Amino acid sequence: MKRLTSYFSLLTSFLSAGLVHAQQPATTPKTLPEVVVTSTKDPSKTVPTIETRREQIAASTPGGASVTSAEEYKTGRAATLKDALDFTPGVLVQSRFGSEEARIAIRGSGIQRTFHGRGLWLMQDGMPLNLADGGFDMQAIEPMAAQYVETFRGANALQYGAATLGGAINFVSNTGHSAPAFQTRFEAGSFNTFRGQISSGFVAGNVDGYVSITAAHTDGFRDWSEQESLRVMANIGAKINSNLENRFYVTWVDSKSQLPGSLTKAQMEANPQQANAASPTNRQRRDYQLFRLANKLTYSDGDNTLTFSTFWSWKDLDHPITPFVGYIDQLSNDLGFDLRYDGRGTLLGMANDLTLGASFMYGVAEDARFANNGGNRGVKTADNKLQSINWSFYFQDKLHLTDRLSLIAGAQVLYGSRDLNEEVLFGANNSDRQEYWGFSPKLGLLFEVNPKSQIYFNASRSFEPPTFGELTSVGAFPSLLPLQAQSATTLEIGTRGQTDRMSWDFSYYYAWVDRELLTLGVLPFPANTINAGKTTHQGVEFGLSYDVLRNLTTANDTRFDRLVVRNNFFWNDFRFKNDPTFGDRLLPGYAPYYYRGELMYEHPCGFYAGPNVEWSPVRYAADMARTTFADPYALLGFKLGYKTQKGVSFFAEVRNITDETYSPTTGVVTNAAAPGAGAVFLPGDGRAFYAGVEFKW
């Protein structure tokens, strides 16, 4: 048992006093009884509840961070990262062609990458899904198997040992404690789309478990864009004693995707459903299998927590693409561990929270290249062994200067190496090795205006060695490029919190970026990534939810219906800084403004309905020469459904009601007006209808 916090005691006293005042004369004194509550513990030490994580993140993070419940995005189609993260402040996800792969970026991380992400850590249960070189595959995630999603923007991801410009996104799995004993869900919709899930959770004494199996198929909006996937996500936890718990994870992913390619603007406007003619001719695909084992052992006595996480992943990539690059056949093995300590104590007579950690990742990929003969392997052109090593040591300390003001300091030391060992087939030996050292400090202030809102400021450094996607030259004969690591200094100020009717998350950041990894089309590497000079990234990340009206058909202070508006807004200003070639020009391939909103009626019985919009109001360049632009667009949608804790739930939605022709993301080239260079547009889906039904028991 413990006393209620002073804030809630004060609030309870206020409400109770109001009732007394309404029933008795103002002069009548009344003594209120002491209010106590029973302390409850999270059922799992390895996977905290969403309520616990929201409290922990708000109390320890002097910058942009948020937690999204999976139940929020499961009110509609829940097939892709865009479906899951559309209303997460600071995260921009734009699908290439309605597929799982997308441009996913935070604060301009991986700004030119429309496939195989980079610039942030994509995590599952606090353990990276990134390969050891830093790249990640979006197909590794199953949004419907998650309990909630944590997002740490920029240096706020340091608590996971991540020190990238973008930060980290962590999908946290269901457990036997959080999942229903039986759940099945089925979605169907336009473009011959079908998606089904069956899952189950159980608790038996000190053991709990969860398993989810999801299968999906779609023909896709565009020609040659068929996708199929099968995902199995499972974990089992065992409480060894009152302080020690172990959880073991198994993941299997089998993903097959046709690649329709990019179009010119004229082709897109004439027929957005067509594929680039070369794509079906060359049978361009990206077929991917992943098998992953992970384990998390957690000891906690209340004030001290020690967590040891390990993982191993096996990945098989079968990837026929352009004749110039050829047919990529890649087999990868990655393994790693993270040892982390979290403790509460005192320092200089003040309360103090300390995090210390060390992590290691090693990856090796057998990378064979062949000529692409209509989707079949031709003559072998290269046979390389790619090896990556990362060592990271990190700490973060929160010193409670007063009851409301805290100082947060932290740092990461990182060592990375990238090795290419070539089996010489033609000409010279391209074997090479690159090494990287980085130090990334962080300092921040967190002020609690009240227990439900904070104001924060932080200054930080980020450090990102290149992935093999940037480091290897483009073509059938890859070699290592002489690239340096990208680094940045970022300042951030903002606020987050909630009142009775409103919740908000607002951040402004400004980053001075050195040696940004970009493809600029500058000789002698016109098609390869180079280190640009100085660039700047600044922007606003703003999420707002507000109850416009309440009790439209009800008359209850706790179970009321409401009309709620949800908003997610970005302003992005990414540009060169005194570049000898590009001056202060904006970086291409990125919308400067983006808005996602919905107005939803919600009833306590579980019914909801309302319109939504996705709006990109300003055109942006798709090439360095600024000759070709992606046009503004606005997509209207509508969603309704019924959601319940047990029993049958359902939804129906329509997207892009006006059947807009648009390109949510583009490739980036030197000059799109040059002959043969204008195919940079990736059309988004046309009008689409989806419906789903879910049963929980």
Image: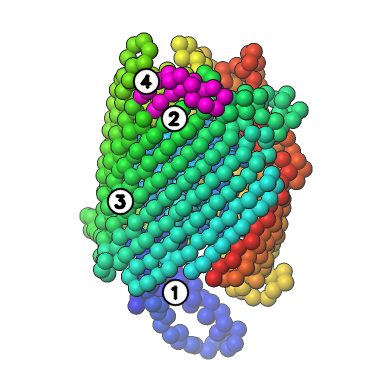
| Crowd around label 2: few <14 · some 14–19 · many ≥20 (10 Å) | some
Disc 1 marks a residue whose amino acid type is: Ser
Disc 4 marks a residue whose amino acid type is: Leu
Residue 122 place in picture, x, y as percent: 44, 43
Q: Earlier in the sequence, mark 4 or mark 1?
A: 1
Element type at mark 1 = helix
Badge number at residue 309: 3
Residue 370 within the segment the image draws in magenta: yes
To which residue does mark 2 refer?
329
Q: Disc 4 vs disc 3: Cβ atoms closer than 8 Å?
A: no
Q: Disc 3 vs disc 2: Cβ atoms closer than 8 Å?
A: no
Q: Is residue 302 left or right of residue 327?
A: left
Which residue lies at the image location 35% right of the left edge and 53% below the top edge? 406
Q: Earlier in the sequence, mark 3 or mark 2?
A: 3
To which residue does mark 4 refer?
480
Which residue lies at the image location 46% right of the left edge and 53% below the top edge? 232
